[in-house]
Structures are given as C-alpha cells and as structure tokens.
Amino acid sequence: MSTHSVHSEPLPTRRRIVRALTEGLEITGAFRNNWRNLLRNKTGELSGAFGDLGTLVPIMVALSSAGCINLPATLVFSGAWNVLSGLIFGIPLPVQPMKALAAVALSRNLTQAETMGAGIGVAAMVMLFALTGTLVKMVDLIPLPIIKGIQVGAGLSLCLTAGNMLSGLELNGTIWYDNLFWAIGAFIFLFGTARWARKVPFTLLIVPVGCLFAGIQMAKDGAELPHWGFNVPLNLQIPTPKEFADGFSIAGLGQVPMTILNSIIAVMFLAKDLLPKQRPPSVTFLGISVGLMNLTGCWFGAMPVCHVGSGGLAAQFRFGARSGISIIILGSIKIVLGLMIGDSMVGLLDRFPKSFLGIMVFAAGMELAAVGQNLNSTAHDLQQLEEEAGIFHDHEATIDPVDKVTEDTRWRVMMVTVGMFLAFHNCFIGFLAGLVAYRMMSAANKKERSKPSWDSDIGSGAVTPHETTPLLSA
C-alpha cells in the first residue's frame, strides 16, 4: 500500500476516465446513504429539498416570462435529472440554472432557440473536457486555495444577491405579504433555530406559508390561479445554425469556465468538506452529467442547467439534507408540477415573497462561505490519504504541518480570488487573479527560502542574532 495523491500517477486516457468514473459513481454506496437517511433523517431531507429555491425560482420565472425557456419542459427535465442525481450520487446535489447564461439571455433578450443553442454548446464543451480527461488535469493544476476562494466568493455572492432581493422591500407594510417585517421574522427564526437545523424544518414551514401568501395575493389581484391539466412538454426546439452560433457566442462562452470551476470542480471539493463519509462524485462524472442534462432537455426548450454550483449543495445541506433523498423529493415534485400544472403556476412563483427567498439565499451563502475556514487546518491538499490501486478509502487523514509563510500565502491567494470574484461578478476573473497571485507569491517564497539563513550557522561556533552573550565581555 502506498501513500500518494489521487491523481499523482500518469495514466492512459481511457484508464484515467474509467478510474474517475468508478471513483465518482458507486450506486451501492449511494443507495446505502439514501436508505440510511430516509430512515433516520426524514425531516431533514424533506426540509433540505426546498433549500435552494431561493436561487431556482427567481431565475426560472424570469426566463419563462421572457420567453427564453419552456417552463413545463424545464420542470420535467430538471426534475428527472434531480431524481437520477439523487439515485446515482447519493448526496444532495440539485440541478439549477446556468446563472451567467441566464443573465445574458435576459439582458440581451435572446429567443428560446438562441438560449437553447447556448445551453447545447456549453454542454458539448463540458462533455468533451470530461471524456478527454481534461477536467481531471484541471483538478491537478488548480491550487486548492483558489478553489476555496471560488467557493467563498460564490457564498458571499449569494449573500449579495439576498441583499438585492431584500433591499426593495419596505417596513411600512404597504405590501402586506412581502415586506421587511416578514424578512426580519424569518431571519430571527432561521438563526434562532440554527443549532437544530435538522430537527426544526425551516423551509418546510416557510415555503407553504409563502405559497399561501402568494395564492391569497393572486386571488386579490384577480389573477388566474394554478390549475390542473395534463401536459407532455415534448415539443422539439431545434436551433438553426445561426441561432446556435448567436446564442453560444453571446451567452454560452462566458458560462463554460464558470460551469467547470464552480459547478464541477468546486462541487467535488465541497462534497468532500460537507460529507466526508460519503464518496464524492468525480469531476469526470459531474462533467458527463452536466453534458447529458443539457444535450437532452435543451432540444425541448428546457432551461440550460448544471449541478447548481457549490451554493446549491450548501443550501440543501444547511437546511438538513444529507443524502440524495432530498433532491429525489424535489425532482418528483417538479415532474408532477411540470406535467399537471405547467405554465399556470408562473403567477404563483412570481408572487412568492422575496422576504422569504432572500433569507433562504442568505443562509445558503453563509453556509458556503464557511468552507474557507479549514484552508490551513484540514483542507484536502494537506491530507495524505491512503489508497490502494486507485480506490478511495475513508481513512484518518494525516495533516501536513503548514509553516507561517505558507499559511499566509494560502490565505492571501484565497482572498485575492474572493475579492476579484466579487469585484467583477465573475468567478473566472477571480480564478485568473488567484492563479497569478499564487504563482508570484510561490516564486517569491521559493526565492526567499533559498537565501542563506542565520540559523544555518548554529552549531558552527558562529554568533547568531538570538544569542544573549555580550559582544564585549570581560
């Protein structure tokens, strides 16, 4: 048995892909984890199922209202992939919009076909990187402080998003169902019960109340309430070559690095941090999963999606989810809504109180940002994990000591990544800034260590700065 890093040995491409797939796909282990939590953590899984609605609902409703996506198809296909992800991975790994792509589609008024072309293009590139082993190489090349920086930056970005949601609310109660009074009450309830998050189901209480408020307001407005009506959303949406080129060049290219960094690589490391006893999905299988989701659903007008970025996993975890049961529940609900209610629920979702959504998003952001605290203590690149024949073992980890210079460098690199991520609202710019800072500081540290040290003369009879003997003695 030897001690080495997971990706330290060069392997042929085919063997590397097979190895990555087997590391990231263990159906038996996923089933055991799901079954165990179904028996012991029913409330937590049910509460966690709705943990990431704060980021899903606003984007999905906005894209649907703008005609960029087909809402029933989005619910059905994303729900199906929720269920499959829960069964295959066994961790609370939801499916959510590609946020950068969605933002551009909304700001540039892209058609549904152009939006689908962008999603298909991103999926094809990510799938290519996964099948050629490029994603595995990226994990080897990207220093962990940068990954942590992307995670912390994404968490704080969610907090800023929550602030934007809440900043438009008022204290005077003009809008009875959505104001700062409800937000303050939700905030107090959230953190007042934070120590018992798995026993006190925050989202199970907040989401039904929010839907009730939205329904009452719809009735007061005279709007059409959601109604039942079976619908199979399988209308093909095939982009023309021009629509594909326009959509991918305008909205897709900028999404590719964000999907790779935040929705694949950062998710793998976050899964290790939050759920250390469960085998994390490999970046190869995550990449293939993202590719398949969009290469199936986008042809029918479904919203381009990925594995949520690290924020969705953190949100589900924060509200009690510990297995794939939570997203199996969420996926099943989405499928039923897509088939039986469809577009008629847009008004309800649009009126869901931002006072509740904002607090949910803020809680998810804080949970994600907290993963940066172990950077210099128990981070995975400080651990020497025993493995045999490339198989991951759940061993006690031996933590390598970190000297003060290395500790300072790692912290600064992480914060540079965070700062640039937030300053430009772009994780790829944060990644580039962190990488430059890491290379420059590592080179400076190496040069500094190569200089002769006063301590090297100890034992040779030479006087050192630490001696207390007077220079002139009697």
Image: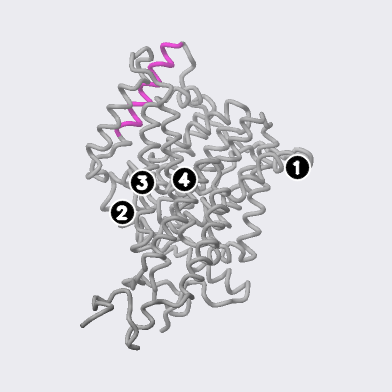
Mark 2 belongs to which amino acid? Asn
Q: Which of the two discs, 1 and 3, labels the residue nearer the N terminus?
A: 1
According to the picture, the residue beneath numbered tag 4 turns out to be 154
| Three-letter code for the amino acid on which mark 3 is drawn | Glu
Which residues, given as a range, are shown in magenta? 205-221
Q: Which residue is mark 3?
A: 367
Secondary element at image label 2: helix
SS at mark 4? Answer: helix
Residue 160 in percent (x, y) is at: 44, 35
Circle 4/circle 1 CB separation < 8 Å: no
- Does any portion of residue 420 appear in the rendered image? yes
Q: Nearer the viewer, mark 1 or mark 3?
A: 3
Mark 3 and mark 4 in contact? Answer it, CB < 8 Å.
no
Mark sitting earlier along the chain (3/4): 4
Quadrant of the frame with the C terminus: bottom left
Looking at the image, can residue 277 be seen?
no
For image coordinates 58% across by 40% down, the residue present is 100
Side (left or right) of 254 relative to 466: right
Can you identify the residue that label 2 sits on? 37
- In the picture of the structure, the residue carrying the numbered disc 1 is 245
Q: How far apart are the alpha carbons under marks 4 and 1?
A: 29 Å
Distance (Cα) linking label 4 and label 2: 28 Å
Q: Check the image and report above or below for 229 versus 276.
A: above
Picture quarter with the N terminus:
bottom left
The question of residue 149 being in magenta is answered with no
- Which amino acid is tagged 1? Ala
